[in-house]
Amino acid sequence: MAQQHLDPPTDPTAGPVTSDALAGYLRAQATEFLRSLRQHRETGAGAASGSAESVAAARALRRSARRISGSLHTFRPLLDTDWSEGMRPELAWLSGTLAREHAYGARLERLLGALNRLSGSAALPAQAAGANAHTAPKGSLTVGAAKAGALLDRQLTLARTRAHSAALQALGSSRFHAVADSVAVLASEVPLTPAAPATDLRPLAAAAADRLTDAVSALPLVTAGHPYNAEALVHGLSADTAPQPQDAPWHQVRLLLRLHRYARELMYGDECPTDVRLLAAGQALNRHRDAAEAAAASASAARTPRIAPATAYALGVLHADQRHEVEAARFAFQQAWQKEAVRTL
Amino acid sequence: MAQQHLDPPTDPTAGPVTSDALAGYLRAQATEFLRSLRQHRETGAGAASGSAESVAAARALRRSARRISGSLHTFRPLLDTDWSEGMRPELAWLSGTLAREHAYGARLERLLGALNRLSGSAALPAQAAGANAHTAPKGSLTVGAAKAGALLDRQLTLARTRAHSAALQALGSSRFHAVADSVAVLASEVPLTPAAPATDLRPLAAAAADRLTDAVSALPLVTAGHPYNAEALVHGLSADTAPQPQDAPWHQVRLLLRLHRYARELMYGDECPTDVRLLAAGQALNRHRDAAEAAAASASAARTPRIAPATAYALGVLHADQRHEVEAARFAFQQAWQKEAVRTL
């Protein structure tokens, strides 16, 4: 996995990219942050279940917070250290808090969709018309699947409601106001170091790309490229309730891919071309993360005391199904990554 | 899926294959049947658990019974109808009865192996040395996995013991002695029709090959060729306890592949070349059948009354794991089948 696997962040024949690009990008993201925040307040963020506009505003808020934080990290030598070191954890706290509500909702949707699929009720027309159509009418779930769905619904809806309250509380806290104030300052004046105007951004962006390719090269891509390697479920029945250690390097690549993508946005400016490879790879890693967390939620629900065996059985099937989604996502990532490498070489 | 996907059963430039080949093959298989039977009796078939020799003899007995039965089917126009129609169900009964004991043993072994794998106790050294090595020492199972293993062990060992008794009873029955007598007659004189000597075997062997290619072309090979299509688990939580209808066409292809293979043996005689494609395809279909039956056994064990939720959960994970094996076997079959097709075209 050499560097040629990634397009250079900018045209190498062009001149150096100056700190103006960084300042411009950060100002734009800060402005977007403040706009989303205003919109979020105006669209009734206080309601128990956010409206579509409020959800979109929260998403935009997270989006710009991640971009600011990522740029502070990738280009930190150009920025006032105290300020950027103080800012990053606050932005991470904010986007993490805001993300949680959405994540629980999406996880529940994913799991209920899987339960329906596994019950054959979301079957293809050809199958629904098949031999067992009379025993499994559309939309029907077995007792176990229905109970598992109800249990997950209860647990994840509760978690989502708590996350919603936590997000509202966060948005009203003095801690949040301090972040918003910092971002407001950033929108007008980026605290660059004295040496920043003379610093070329390209080596820093290239270093972010290198960190990504290094992390990818440490992934077990040969295994992932063999379909049905049964790797993701290896600890499916392990006594360990902690997140699966085998997932961590993939999650790490997901974060590094994001940092690389933000650096590209910053370097290319408005003309940033869509890299279908990064897009496909990023989507695969999002799916990897979502499936891994859904599998963990299913395993966790199965540890609820006094559930019926049929419920536990359905949760076991669901857990394994989601771990196979994890494996499928790794395969998809490997395919996406490999495809372009062939083209480039 | 055209006929060119299969090598012609014999060199088309050679002359017709006569009924001598059929008679010779049947006599040889009948002799082998009688030899295995003698060996089976001598190696203490009466013992509760068969010795290695007795197991090998039973396997050889089944092997020749299947070949005789298959040849009677493929080349039935050359054989005395009353005799061959009467013989085939008896041979099927015999090989089915003998196969059951072995099948239960193999199924238990497959399921216990999967439980170990899913518990990470058969992990690769790299993983065993990983972060969670301290929580999941080698060979350890969670309570649920251990209980599920014990339950499957109990159920399948009981089934196996019953199958063993049934096989012993069958081998001592007058029904079996009638089969053995028929095979003994076959070893010296094959009851051909008067028209048989003038009949070319090649069109009959080609028809067997055609039945196979037709059945393969009806399989959802495009879906099977897409890894992680999540098709095999579609009814994983269905209320239907009957065998999954989606498996049936694959089982059918498995049988037709076997008939084609026996026809090739018969036509080529001792010089029958190994067709790696048929071999790989056949192995994939055996794995498909074994995994499907193991998945069903796991689902069936989960319906045992009063099991603990942790046991049911482990059985759910195991069921899903084996259904993914089913999917993986379909993918392997598609790959094996497609590979040679490309070479041939």
Image: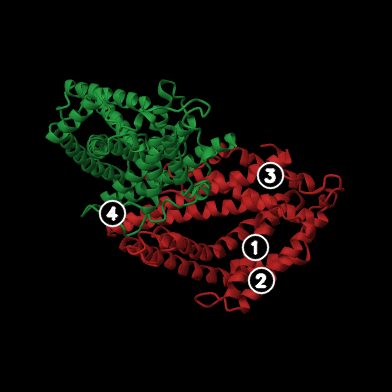
Chain colours: A green, B red
- Quarter of the figure with the N terminus of chain B: top right
Residue B249 seen in render:
yes
Q: Are marks 2 and 1 on the same chain?
A: yes
Q: Give, as a three-letter code, the residue at label 4.
A: Pro
* Residue B258 in the figure: left or right of residue A241: right
- Quarter of the figure with the C terminus of chain B: top right
Q: Residues within 10 Å of mark 3 (few under 14, many from 20)?
A: some
Q: Residues within 10 Å of mark 1 (few under 14, many from 20)?
A: some
Is residue B113 shown above or below A53? below
Q: CA distance from mark 2 to mark 1?
A: 10 Å
Mark 2 — on which chain does it sit?
A: B
Is residue A219 shown above or below A86? below
Q: Which residue is mark 1?
A: B63
Q: Earlier in the sequence, mark 3 or mark 1?
A: 1
Q: Are marks 1 and 4 on the same chain?
A: no
Q: Which residue is mark 3?
A: B340
Is residue A170 shown above or below B316? above
Q: Which mark is residue A101?
A: none
* Foreground: disc 2 or disc 3: 3
User: At x 32% / y 56%, what residue is drawn?
Assistant: B312
* Foreground: disc 1 or disc 4: 4
Image location of residue A40, percent across then percent down:
20, 24
Image location of residue B89, percent across then percent down:
61, 56
Q: Which mark is residue B36?
A: 2
